[in-house]
Amino acid sequence: MKKCKYLENPIDTLKVDESILDILLNNNVFKIKDLWELNRANLKDMDLTDNQIKLISIKMQLLGIDINKKRY
């Protein structure tokens, strides 16, 4: 499987809202790889809303990846 060049980038590379970024950083999600290894249930446990999770998913899909270790 082809390695994604974005996985080691800082989480702020996704350019999500500051409120989402704060929640992720407070839950020790510092790199895109940390987020990529999670699933929706993990994100819900961090108190992210469905809309916030959807926004994260869209931003990741634009990089060719998705939560729960999916690549496109």
Image: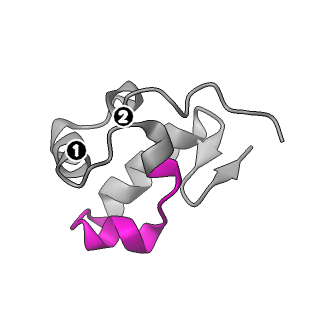
Give how far across and how far down residue 12 sits, in percent.
Answer: 32, 29
Residues under labels 1 and 2: Cα distance?
8 Å
Q: How many labels does the image show?
A: 2
What residue is disc 1 on?
25
Name the mark on residue 11. Answer: 2
Circle 2: residue type = Ile
The answer to whether the residues at label 1 and label 2 have Cβ atoms under 8 Å apart is yes
**Residue in the picture at 58% in, 50% down:** 66
**Local crowd at mark 1 within 10 Å, few (<14), some, or many (≥20)?**
few
Which comes before the other along the chain, label 1 or label 2?
2
**Local crowd at mark 2 within 10 Å, few (<14), some, or many (≥20)?**
many
Q: In this view, does 47 lie to the left or right of 68?
A: left
The region drawn magenta spans: 35-49
Give how far across and how far down residue 23 sits, in percent.
Answer: 19, 51
Q: In this view, does 41 lie above or below 25?
A: below
* SS for callout 2: helix
**Residue in the picture at 33% in, 59% down:** 51
**Residue in the picture at 36% in, 34% down:** 11
